[in-house]
Image (cartoon, helix red, strand yellow):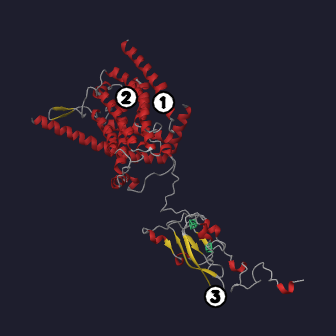
Amino acid sequence: MFVWIAGIVLLLAKIGVILAVVLVVAAYLVWVERKLLARMQVRRGPNRAGKFGLLQPVADAVKLLTKEDTVPAEADRTIFLLAPAVVALTALLMFAVVPFGPPLTLWGRQVPMVIADLNVGLLFIFALSSLGVYGVALGGWAANSKFSLLGGIRGAAQMISYELALGLSLVPVVILAGSFSLVDIVAAQSRVPFVLVQPIACAIFFIAAVAEIKRIPFDLPEAENELGAGFHMEYSGMRFGLFFIGEYVHMQVLGALVAVFFLGGWHGPLLPGPVWLLLKMMLVCLVLIWIRGTLPRLRYDQLMALGWKVLVPTALVNILLTGMIVLL
Amino acid sequence: MKALGAGFATTLRHLWRKPVTEEYPEYRRALPERSRARIVLTHDPDGGERCVACYLCSGVCPVSCISMQAAEMPDGRRYAAWFRINFARCIYCGLCEEACPTAAIQLTPDFENIQRDILKLVFEKEDLLVDGCGKDKTYNFYRWAGVATAAGGKGAHEREAPPVRVRSNLP
Ligand code: SF4
Ligand code: SF4
Protein backbone atom coordinates (compact mmCIF):
# COMPACT_ATOMS: atom_id res chain seq x y z
CA MET A 1 0.00 0.00 0.00
CA PHE A 2 2.74 2.47 0.96
CA VAL A 3 4.77 1.58 -2.10
CA TRP A 4 1.70 2.09 -4.22
CA ILE A 5 1.04 5.59 -2.82
CA ALA A 6 4.71 6.49 -3.12
CA GLY A 7 4.59 5.37 -6.74
CA ILE A 8 1.62 7.63 -7.46
CA VAL A 9 3.28 10.58 -5.74
CA LEU A 10 6.47 9.97 -7.68
CA LEU A 11 4.54 9.75 -10.93
CA LEU A 12 2.72 12.99 -10.19
CA ALA A 13 6.02 14.65 -9.33
CA LYS A 14 7.52 13.52 -12.61
CA ILE A 15 4.51 14.74 -14.55
CA GLY A 16 4.62 18.06 -12.73
CA VAL A 17 8.29 18.61 -13.40
CA ILE A 18 7.97 17.69 -17.06
CA LEU A 19 4.91 19.87 -17.54
CA ALA A 20 6.59 22.83 -15.89
CA VAL A 21 9.79 22.43 -17.86
CA VAL A 22 7.99 21.91 -21.14
CA LEU A 23 5.71 24.90 -20.70
CA VAL A 24 8.45 27.25 -19.54
CA VAL A 25 10.67 26.11 -22.36
CA ALA A 26 7.77 26.62 -24.77
CA ALA A 27 7.33 30.18 -23.56
CA TYR A 28 11.00 30.95 -23.92
CA LEU A 29 11.21 29.17 -27.23
CA VAL A 30 8.85 31.84 -28.52
CA TRP A 31 11.23 34.46 -27.19
CA VAL A 32 14.29 32.72 -28.66
CA GLU A 33 12.54 32.34 -31.97
CA ARG A 34 11.52 35.99 -32.12
CA LYS A 35 15.00 37.10 -31.16
CA LEU A 36 16.79 34.86 -33.62
CA LEU A 37 14.42 35.61 -36.47
CA ALA A 38 14.85 39.30 -35.76
CA ARG A 39 18.61 39.00 -35.86
CA MET A 40 18.46 37.05 -39.11
CA GLN A 41 16.45 39.94 -40.52
CA VAL A 42 18.90 42.47 -39.01
CA ARG A 43 16.29 43.63 -36.49
CA ARG A 44 16.47 43.66 -32.71
CA GLY A 45 13.43 41.66 -31.73
CA PRO A 46 11.57 42.07 -28.44
CA ASN A 47 13.68 44.15 -26.06
CA ARG A 48 11.24 46.23 -24.04
CA ALA A 49 9.88 43.88 -21.36
CA GLY A 50 12.75 43.29 -18.95
CA LYS A 51 16.42 42.90 -19.79
CA PHE A 52 16.77 41.71 -23.40
CA GLY A 53 12.99 41.37 -23.50
CA LEU A 54 13.23 38.35 -21.21
CA LEU A 55 9.88 39.13 -19.62
CA GLN A 56 8.18 39.16 -23.01
CA PRO A 57 6.63 35.69 -22.55
CA VAL A 58 5.13 36.87 -19.25
CA ALA A 59 3.74 39.96 -20.89
CA ASP A 60 2.34 37.87 -23.73
CA ALA A 61 0.69 35.48 -21.28
CA VAL A 62 -0.92 38.33 -19.35
CA LYS A 63 -2.15 39.86 -22.57
CA LEU A 64 -3.58 36.61 -23.89
CA LEU A 65 -5.28 35.80 -20.59
CA THR A 66 -6.92 39.20 -20.26
CA LYS A 67 -8.16 39.32 -23.84
CA GLU A 68 -11.78 38.75 -24.60
CA ASP A 69 -12.58 35.19 -25.60
CA THR A 70 -14.77 35.61 -28.65
CA VAL A 71 -16.70 32.87 -30.38
CA PRO A 72 -18.09 33.61 -33.85
CA ALA A 73 -21.89 33.61 -33.89
CA GLU A 74 -22.11 30.98 -36.62
CA ALA A 75 -19.47 28.71 -35.13
CA ASP A 76 -20.08 25.19 -33.92
CA ARG A 77 -19.55 26.13 -30.27
CA THR A 78 -18.52 22.86 -28.65
CA ILE A 79 -16.02 21.86 -31.26
CA PHE A 80 -14.76 25.40 -31.60
CA LEU A 81 -14.06 25.58 -27.89
CA LEU A 82 -12.47 22.13 -27.70
CA ALA A 83 -10.19 22.22 -30.73
CA PRO A 84 -7.35 24.26 -29.18
CA ALA A 85 -7.28 21.95 -26.19
CA VAL A 86 -6.90 18.96 -28.49
CA VAL A 87 -3.87 20.50 -30.14
CA ALA A 88 -2.18 21.48 -26.88
CA LEU A 89 -3.10 18.25 -25.12
CA THR A 90 -1.86 15.84 -27.78
CA ALA A 91 1.39 17.75 -27.95
CA LEU A 92 1.87 17.56 -24.20
CA LEU A 93 0.86 13.91 -23.97
CA MET A 94 3.61 12.85 -26.32
CA PHE A 95 6.14 13.68 -23.64
CA ALA A 96 4.75 10.84 -21.55
CA VAL A 97 6.82 8.24 -23.37
CA VAL A 98 10.03 10.22 -23.85
CA PRO A 99 12.77 8.88 -21.58
CA PHE A 100 14.79 11.72 -20.16
CA GLY A 101 17.56 9.96 -18.30
CA PRO A 102 18.95 6.67 -17.05
CA PRO A 103 16.90 4.93 -14.32
CA LEU A 104 17.46 6.53 -10.95
CA THR A 105 17.95 4.58 -7.75
CA LEU A 106 15.93 6.08 -4.88
CA TRP A 107 15.75 4.35 -1.48
CA GLY A 108 17.00 1.14 -2.97
CA ARG A 109 14.39 1.10 -5.74
CA GLN A 110 14.76 1.62 -9.44
CA VAL A 111 12.85 4.66 -10.65
CA PRO A 112 12.60 4.86 -14.44
CA MET A 113 13.12 8.39 -15.72
CA VAL A 114 10.12 8.27 -17.98
CA ILE A 115 6.46 8.81 -17.20
CA ALA A 116 5.24 5.69 -18.99
CA ASP A 117 7.52 3.12 -20.59
CA LEU A 118 4.95 1.84 -23.07
CA ASN A 119 6.08 -1.09 -25.14
CA VAL A 120 4.29 0.54 -28.06
CA GLY A 121 5.63 3.99 -27.31
CA LEU A 122 6.37 4.74 -30.92
CA LEU A 123 2.85 3.86 -32.02
CA PHE A 124 1.50 5.96 -29.15
CA ILE A 125 3.39 8.92 -30.55
CA PHE A 126 2.05 8.36 -34.04
CA ALA A 127 -1.46 8.00 -32.72
CA LEU A 128 -1.23 11.29 -30.84
CA SER A 129 0.33 13.13 -33.72
CA SER A 130 -2.53 12.00 -35.96
CA LEU A 131 -5.04 13.04 -33.32
CA GLY A 132 -3.45 16.46 -33.12
CA VAL A 133 -4.50 17.07 -36.70
CA TYR A 134 -8.10 16.79 -35.57
CA GLY A 135 -7.58 19.91 -33.52
CA VAL A 136 -6.46 21.73 -36.63
CA ALA A 137 -9.06 20.35 -39.01
CA LEU A 138 -11.98 20.65 -36.61
CA GLY A 139 -10.89 24.05 -35.33
CA GLY A 140 -10.79 25.27 -38.88
CA TRP A 141 -14.11 23.72 -39.70
CA ALA A 142 -15.98 24.77 -36.58
CA ALA A 143 -15.14 28.46 -36.96
CA ASN A 144 -17.43 28.53 -39.99
CA SER A 145 -15.26 30.95 -41.88
CA LYS A 146 -13.88 30.19 -45.29
CA PHE A 147 -10.26 30.93 -44.54
CA SER A 148 -10.30 28.82 -41.40
CA LEU A 149 -11.93 26.02 -43.35
CA LEU A 150 -9.27 26.20 -46.06
CA GLY A 151 -6.63 26.06 -43.35
CA GLY A 152 -8.28 23.07 -41.70
CA ILE A 153 -8.60 21.21 -44.97
CA ARG A 154 -5.01 21.91 -45.79
CA GLY A 155 -4.07 20.54 -42.40
CA ALA A 156 -5.91 17.31 -43.14
CA ALA A 157 -4.52 17.02 -46.66
CA GLN A 158 -1.04 17.75 -45.43
CA MET A 159 -1.38 14.92 -42.94
CA ILE A 160 -2.01 12.40 -45.73
CA SER A 161 1.17 13.38 -47.46
CA TYR A 162 3.60 13.22 -44.57
CA GLU A 163 2.13 10.69 -42.14
CA LEU A 164 3.16 7.68 -44.22
CA ALA A 165 6.70 8.90 -44.70
CA LEU A 166 6.90 9.71 -41.01
CA GLY A 167 5.94 6.18 -40.07
CA LEU A 168 8.07 4.47 -42.69
CA SER A 169 11.15 6.46 -41.83
CA LEU A 170 11.16 5.01 -38.33
CA VAL A 171 10.84 1.37 -39.37
CA PRO A 172 14.63 0.98 -39.77
CA VAL A 173 15.06 2.41 -36.28
CA VAL A 174 12.65 -0.17 -34.95
CA ILE A 175 14.44 -2.91 -36.88
CA LEU A 176 17.75 -1.87 -35.39
CA ALA A 177 16.48 -1.44 -31.84
CA GLY A 178 14.17 -4.43 -32.00
CA SER A 179 11.50 -2.65 -29.96
CA PHE A 180 8.76 -0.07 -30.16
CA SER A 181 9.56 1.26 -26.71
CA LEU A 182 11.38 4.58 -26.66
CA VAL A 183 13.38 3.46 -23.64
CA ASP A 184 14.72 0.47 -25.54
CA ILE A 185 15.43 2.59 -28.60
CA VAL A 186 17.52 4.95 -26.53
CA ALA A 187 19.23 2.02 -24.83
CA ALA A 188 20.13 0.59 -28.24
CA GLN A 189 22.06 3.78 -29.01
CA SER A 190 24.31 3.67 -25.97
CA ARG A 191 27.38 3.32 -28.20
CA VAL A 192 26.47 4.79 -31.59
CA PRO A 193 23.61 7.23 -32.18
CA PHE A 194 21.39 6.09 -35.02
CA VAL A 195 21.97 9.23 -37.04
CA LEU A 196 25.34 7.78 -38.06
CA VAL A 197 23.81 4.45 -39.03
CA GLN A 198 20.61 5.80 -40.56
CA PRO A 199 21.23 9.31 -41.92
CA ILE A 200 18.57 8.90 -44.62
CA ALA A 201 15.93 7.81 -42.14
CA CYS A 202 16.89 10.77 -39.97
CA ALA A 203 16.51 13.21 -42.86
CA ILE A 204 13.14 11.78 -43.91
CA PHE A 205 11.88 11.77 -40.35
CA PHE A 206 12.98 15.33 -39.84
CA ILE A 207 11.34 16.62 -43.01
CA ALA A 208 8.12 14.72 -42.37
CA ALA A 209 8.07 15.87 -38.77
CA VAL A 210 8.51 19.50 -39.76
CA ALA A 211 5.42 19.01 -41.89
CA GLU A 212 3.75 17.37 -38.93
CA ILE A 213 4.31 20.31 -36.62
CA LYS A 214 3.28 22.68 -39.40
CA ARG A 215 6.25 24.96 -39.46
CA ILE A 216 7.75 26.79 -42.37
CA PRO A 217 8.32 25.57 -45.07
CA PHE A 218 5.26 23.38 -44.46
CA ASP A 219 2.99 25.78 -42.61
CA LEU A 220 0.26 25.54 -45.22
CA PRO A 221 -2.64 25.36 -42.74
CA GLU A 222 -1.58 28.72 -41.28
CA ALA A 223 -0.19 30.44 -44.36
CA GLU A 224 -0.37 33.98 -43.02
CA ASN A 225 -0.11 35.63 -46.40
CA GLU A 226 -2.83 33.64 -48.15
CA LEU A 227 -5.21 32.60 -45.40
CA GLY A 228 -4.77 35.25 -42.76
CA ALA A 229 -3.98 32.84 -39.98
CA GLY A 230 -5.60 29.73 -41.42
CA PHE A 231 -7.24 27.38 -38.99
CA HIS A 232 -6.82 29.57 -35.92
CA MET A 233 -7.97 32.75 -37.60
CA GLU A 234 -11.15 33.18 -35.55
CA TYR A 235 -9.56 32.37 -32.21
CA SER A 236 -8.74 35.00 -29.65
CA GLY A 237 -7.23 35.24 -26.20
CA MET A 238 -5.99 32.13 -24.47
CA ARG A 239 -7.66 29.79 -26.94
CA PHE A 240 -5.36 31.17 -29.56
CA GLY A 241 -2.68 30.90 -26.90
CA LEU A 242 -3.37 27.17 -26.61
CA PHE A 243 -2.77 26.70 -30.33
CA PHE A 244 0.39 28.66 -29.88
CA ILE A 245 1.54 26.58 -26.91
CA GLY A 246 0.64 23.49 -28.89
CA GLU A 247 2.87 24.60 -31.72
CA TYR A 248 5.85 25.28 -29.50
CA VAL A 249 5.39 22.14 -27.43
CA HIS A 250 5.24 20.29 -30.72
CA MET A 251 8.58 21.82 -31.63
CA GLN A 252 10.03 20.42 -28.44
CA VAL A 253 8.40 17.06 -29.02
CA LEU A 254 10.00 16.97 -32.42
CA GLY A 255 13.31 17.89 -30.84
CA ALA A 256 12.91 15.20 -28.22
CA LEU A 257 11.91 12.61 -30.81
CA VAL A 258 14.81 13.39 -33.12
CA ALA A 259 17.04 13.16 -30.06
CA VAL A 260 15.52 9.86 -28.93
CA PHE A 261 15.40 8.18 -32.33
CA PHE A 262 18.59 9.43 -33.91
CA LEU A 263 20.81 11.43 -31.56
CA GLY A 264 21.08 8.89 -28.79
CA GLY A 265 18.50 10.32 -26.42
CA TRP A 266 19.95 11.19 -23.05
CA HIS A 267 23.26 9.47 -23.79
CA GLY A 268 26.24 11.77 -23.70
CA PRO A 269 29.52 12.28 -21.91
CA LEU A 270 30.01 14.25 -18.67
CA LEU A 271 26.62 15.93 -18.26
CA PRO A 272 23.63 14.15 -16.68
CA GLY A 273 21.04 12.56 -18.96
CA PRO A 274 18.21 15.10 -18.79
CA VAL A 275 20.61 17.93 -19.61
CA TRP A 276 21.81 16.13 -22.70
CA LEU A 277 18.27 15.49 -23.81
CA LEU A 278 17.41 19.16 -23.32
CA LEU A 279 20.51 20.25 -25.22
CA LYS A 280 19.69 17.99 -28.14
CA MET A 281 16.10 19.19 -28.13
CA MET A 282 17.26 22.79 -28.20
CA LEU A 283 19.65 22.04 -31.03
CA VAL A 284 16.77 20.72 -33.13
CA CYS A 285 14.63 23.70 -32.20
CA LEU A 286 17.37 26.12 -33.24
CA VAL A 287 17.65 24.34 -36.56
CA LEU A 288 13.88 24.70 -36.95
CA ILE A 289 14.11 28.44 -36.30
CA TRP A 290 16.96 28.71 -38.72
CA ILE A 291 14.89 26.93 -41.35
CA ARG A 292 12.04 29.31 -40.68
CA GLY A 293 14.33 32.26 -41.17
CA THR A 294 15.55 30.90 -44.49
CA LEU A 295 13.00 28.95 -46.49
CA PRO A 296 9.79 30.21 -48.12
CA ARG A 297 6.57 28.24 -47.82
CA LEU A 298 6.09 25.35 -50.22
CA ARG A 299 3.03 25.19 -52.40
CA TYR A 300 0.33 22.69 -51.65
CA ASP A 301 1.13 20.44 -54.61
CA GLN A 302 4.84 20.70 -53.94
CA LEU A 303 4.32 19.34 -50.46
CA MET A 304 2.20 16.49 -51.83
CA ALA A 305 4.78 15.72 -54.51
CA LEU A 306 7.60 15.82 -51.98
CA GLY A 307 5.70 13.52 -49.63
CA TRP A 308 4.54 10.94 -52.13
CA LYS A 309 7.21 11.01 -54.82
CA VAL A 310 10.33 11.53 -52.76
CA LEU A 311 9.94 10.75 -49.08
CA VAL A 312 7.81 7.61 -49.25
CA PRO A 313 9.86 5.80 -51.95
CA THR A 314 13.13 6.76 -50.28
CA ALA A 315 11.84 5.51 -46.95
CA LEU A 316 10.76 2.20 -48.53
CA VAL A 317 14.13 1.68 -50.19
CA ASN A 318 15.79 2.52 -46.91
CA ILE A 319 13.71 -0.09 -45.10
CA LEU A 320 14.60 -2.71 -47.71
CA LEU A 321 18.30 -1.95 -47.45
CA THR A 322 18.28 -1.97 -43.67
CA GLY A 323 16.35 -5.19 -43.62
CA MET A 324 18.79 -6.83 -46.01
CA ILE A 325 21.82 -5.70 -44.06
CA VAL A 326 20.33 -6.82 -40.75
CA LEU A 327 19.44 -10.23 -42.25
CA LEU A 328 22.89 -10.71 -43.70
CA MET B 1 20.83 21.94 -53.05
CA LYS B 2 23.51 24.54 -53.63
CA ALA B 3 20.91 27.29 -53.57
CA LEU B 4 19.54 25.92 -50.31
CA GLY B 5 22.99 25.95 -48.78
CA ALA B 6 23.56 29.52 -49.92
CA GLY B 7 20.25 30.55 -48.36
CA PHE B 8 21.08 28.98 -45.03
CA ALA B 9 24.55 30.52 -45.08
CA THR B 10 23.06 33.95 -45.73
CA THR B 11 20.70 33.80 -42.78
CA LEU B 12 23.46 32.47 -40.58
CA ARG B 13 25.74 35.32 -41.58
CA HIS B 14 23.04 37.88 -40.87
CA LEU B 15 22.83 36.56 -37.34
CA TRP B 16 26.09 38.34 -36.62
CA ARG B 17 25.27 41.61 -38.30
CA LYS B 18 24.43 44.67 -36.28
CA PRO B 19 20.69 45.33 -36.28
CA VAL B 20 19.63 48.38 -38.23
CA THR B 21 16.63 49.05 -36.02
CA GLU B 22 16.19 52.62 -34.85
CA GLU B 23 14.81 52.46 -31.34
CA TYR B 24 12.08 55.00 -31.28
CA PRO B 25 11.61 56.63 -27.90
CA GLU B 26 15.36 56.86 -27.33
CA TYR B 27 16.25 57.82 -30.85
CA ARG B 28 13.98 60.20 -32.72
CA ARG B 29 14.88 60.60 -36.32
CA ALA B 30 14.45 64.16 -37.55
CA LEU B 31 11.49 63.90 -39.89
CA PRO B 32 11.46 65.68 -43.24
CA GLU B 33 9.73 69.04 -43.25
CA ARG B 34 7.04 67.78 -45.56
CA SER B 35 6.07 64.70 -43.55
CA ARG B 36 2.40 64.77 -42.71
CA ALA B 37 1.18 64.85 -39.13
CA ARG B 38 -0.54 67.35 -36.80
CA ILE B 39 -2.23 70.15 -38.72
CA VAL B 40 -1.76 73.86 -37.97
CA LEU B 41 -3.27 77.10 -39.19
CA THR B 42 -0.64 79.69 -40.06
CA HIS B 43 -0.44 83.47 -40.25
CA ASP B 44 0.63 85.51 -43.26
CA PRO B 45 3.92 87.45 -43.16
CA ASP B 46 2.04 90.56 -42.09
CA GLY B 47 0.63 88.84 -39.04
CA GLY B 48 -2.95 88.34 -40.17
CA GLU B 49 -4.74 85.02 -40.08
CA ARG B 50 -4.35 83.36 -43.43
CA CYS B 51 -7.52 81.27 -43.47
CA VAL B 52 -10.34 82.89 -45.42
CA ALA B 53 -12.91 80.25 -44.49
CA CYS B 54 -13.45 79.20 -48.08
CA TYR B 55 -14.48 75.66 -47.08
CA LEU B 56 -12.21 74.12 -49.72
CA CYS B 57 -10.28 72.05 -47.20
CA SER B 58 -13.46 70.93 -45.53
CA GLY B 59 -14.90 70.00 -48.90
CA VAL B 60 -11.90 68.03 -50.09
CA CYS B 61 -11.32 66.18 -46.83
CA PRO B 62 -12.08 62.50 -47.55
CA VAL B 63 -13.21 61.81 -44.00
CA SER B 64 -14.98 65.15 -43.44
CA CYS B 65 -13.13 66.00 -40.29
CA ILE B 66 -12.86 69.75 -40.83
CA SER B 67 -15.71 72.08 -39.97
CA MET B 68 -15.84 75.87 -39.67
CA GLN B 69 -18.04 78.93 -39.81
CA ALA B 70 -17.16 81.78 -42.18
CA ALA B 71 -17.34 85.41 -41.07
CA GLU B 72 -16.24 88.78 -42.46
CA MET B 73 -14.18 91.59 -40.96
CA PRO B 74 -15.40 95.21 -41.35
CA ASP B 75 -12.84 95.76 -44.12
CA GLY B 76 -14.23 92.88 -46.15
CA ARG B 77 -11.58 90.37 -45.18
CA ARG B 78 -13.00 86.89 -44.55
CA TYR B 79 -11.99 84.71 -41.64
CA ALA B 80 -13.23 81.65 -39.79
CA ALA B 81 -15.38 82.44 -36.78
CA TRP B 82 -14.61 78.99 -35.53
CA PHE B 83 -12.55 76.25 -37.08
CA ARG B 84 -12.45 72.68 -35.87
CA ILE B 85 -10.47 69.61 -36.90
CA ASN B 86 -11.28 66.22 -35.47
CA PHE B 87 -7.90 64.49 -35.35
CA ALA B 88 -9.55 61.30 -34.25
CA ARG B 89 -10.83 61.01 -37.79
CA CYS B 90 -8.11 62.73 -39.77
CA ILE B 91 -6.10 60.30 -41.89
CA TYR B 92 -3.30 62.81 -42.49
CA CYS B 93 -3.68 62.59 -46.26
CA GLY B 94 -2.63 66.18 -46.81
CA LEU B 95 -5.42 66.96 -49.27
CA CYS B 96 -6.56 69.94 -47.21
CA GLU B 97 -3.13 71.49 -47.49
CA GLU B 98 -3.16 71.02 -51.25
CA ALA B 99 -6.61 72.49 -51.62
CA CYS B 100 -6.00 75.59 -49.53
CA PRO B 101 -5.71 78.73 -51.72
CA THR B 102 -4.11 80.76 -48.95
CA ALA B 103 -1.50 78.29 -47.61
CA ALA B 104 -3.23 78.63 -44.27
CA ILE B 105 -3.71 75.00 -43.36
CA GLN B 106 -0.47 73.03 -43.19
CA LEU B 107 0.61 69.64 -41.96
CA THR B 108 3.62 69.47 -39.66
CA PRO B 109 6.00 66.63 -38.80
CA ASP B 110 4.80 66.50 -35.19
CA PHE B 111 3.17 63.09 -34.98
CA GLU B 112 3.26 62.54 -31.22
CA ASN B 113 -0.28 63.71 -30.77
CA ILE B 114 -2.03 60.99 -28.81
CA GLN B 115 -4.72 61.34 -26.15
CA ARG B 116 -6.41 58.87 -23.86
CA ASP B 117 -9.69 60.72 -24.17
CA ILE B 118 -10.80 60.77 -27.76
CA LEU B 119 -12.59 64.10 -27.39
CA LYS B 120 -9.28 65.74 -26.60
CA LEU B 121 -8.35 65.08 -30.20
CA VAL B 122 -10.92 67.59 -31.39
CA PHE B 123 -8.84 70.74 -31.95
CA GLU B 124 -10.43 74.17 -31.99
CA LYS B 125 -9.08 77.18 -33.82
CA GLU B 126 -7.06 78.37 -30.79
CA ASP B 127 -5.32 74.98 -30.66
CA LEU B 128 -4.63 75.01 -34.38
CA LEU B 129 -3.36 78.55 -34.84
CA VAL B 130 0.40 78.98 -34.68
CA ASP B 131 2.59 82.03 -34.89
CA GLY B 132 4.52 82.44 -38.12
CA CYS B 133 4.01 81.38 -41.69
CA GLY B 134 4.95 77.72 -41.69
CA LYS B 135 6.38 76.42 -44.94
CA ASP B 136 5.47 79.37 -47.19
CA LYS B 137 7.22 82.42 -45.75
CA THR B 138 6.07 85.07 -48.20
CA TYR B 139 2.57 84.43 -49.41
CA ASN B 140 -0.19 86.78 -48.37
CA PHE B 141 -3.46 85.99 -50.11
CA TYR B 142 -4.95 89.48 -49.82
CA ARG B 143 -1.92 91.10 -51.48
CA TRP B 144 -2.72 89.13 -54.62
CA ALA B 145 -6.47 88.67 -54.64
CA GLY B 146 -8.42 91.45 -56.24
CA VAL B 147 -10.54 92.11 -53.20
CA ALA B 148 -10.53 95.56 -51.61
CA THR B 149 -9.45 95.20 -47.99
CA ALA B 150 -7.12 96.98 -45.61
CA ALA B 151 -4.26 95.17 -47.37
CA GLY B 152 -4.91 97.10 -50.56
CA GLY B 153 -7.65 98.74 -52.56
CA LYS B 154 -8.69 98.07 -56.16
CA GLY B 155 -5.69 98.01 -58.44
CA ALA B 156 -3.21 98.10 -55.59
CA HIS B 157 -2.51 94.35 -55.54
CA GLU B 158 0.48 92.54 -56.93
CA ARG B 159 0.50 92.27 -60.74
CA GLU B 160 -2.86 93.98 -60.92
CA ALA B 161 -3.57 96.74 -63.44
CA PRO B 162 -5.53 99.76 -62.18
CA PRO B 163 -9.25 99.27 -62.68
CA VAL B 164 -10.60 100.28 -66.08
CA ARG B 165 -12.95 103.27 -65.91
CA VAL B 166 -15.87 101.96 -67.87
CA ARG B 167 -17.41 105.29 -68.83
CA SER B 168 -14.32 107.03 -70.20
CA ASN B 169 -13.17 103.83 -71.87
CA LEU B 170 -16.10 103.80 -74.31
CA PRO B 171 -15.26 104.79 -77.87
S1 SF4 C 1 -5.13 65.67 -43.76
FE1 SF4 C 1 -6.76 64.77 -45.01
S2 SF4 C 1 -8.07 63.84 -43.49
FE2 SF4 C 1 -6.81 65.26 -42.35
S3 SF4 C 1 -7.98 67.12 -42.29
FE3 SF4 C 1 -6.67 67.25 -44.09
S4 SF4 C 1 -7.95 66.49 -45.76
FE4 SF4 C 1 -8.92 65.87 -43.87
S1 SF4 D 1 -7.77 76.56 -44.29
FE1 SF4 D 1 -7.50 77.17 -46.40
S2 SF4 D 1 -8.89 75.84 -47.53
FE2 SF4 D 1 -9.50 75.74 -45.40
S3 SF4 D 1 -11.09 77.26 -45.20
FE3 SF4 D 1 -9.17 78.25 -44.61
S4 SF4 D 1 -8.45 79.17 -46.48
FE4 SF4 D 1 -10.00 77.71 -47.11
Going by the image, does A313 lie left or right of A179?
A: right
Against B141, is A51 above or below? above
Looking at the image, which residue is at 38% across and 47% down?
A74
Q: At 51% from the left edge and 65% from the top edge, which residue is drawn?
A: B89
Secondary structure at numbered mark 1: helix
Instruction: Name the chain under label 2.
Output: A
Q: Are marks 1 and 2 in contact (CB under 8 Å)?
A: no
* Labels 1 and 3 share a subunit: no
Q: Looking at numbered disc 3 in the image, what kind of residue is underneath it? A: Pro
Can you say which quadrant of the picture contains the C terminus of chain A?
A: top left
Going by the numbered disc 1, the residue's amino acid type is Met
**Residue B63, image x, y percentages:** 55, 64
A152 displayed left or right of B101: left
Q: Amino acid at mark 2?
A: Phe
Residue farthest along the top direction in this orientation: A328
Q: Pointer 1: residues within 10 angstroms few (<14), some, or many (20+)? A: some
Q: Is residue B146 above or below residue A200?
A: below
- Check disc 2 and report the residue beneath it: A262
Residue designated by label 1? A304
Q: Secondary structure at mark 2?
A: helix
Label 2 near ligand 1 (CB < 8 Å):
no
Mark 1: C-beta under 8 Å from nearest atom of ligand 1: no
Q: Nearer the viewer, residue A169 or B44?
A: B44
Please name the residue shown 51% across and 50% down the image: B18
Please give the label number shown on residue B74: 3
Quarter of the render that holds ligand 2: bottom right
> Could one spot residue A224 in this view of the protein?
yes
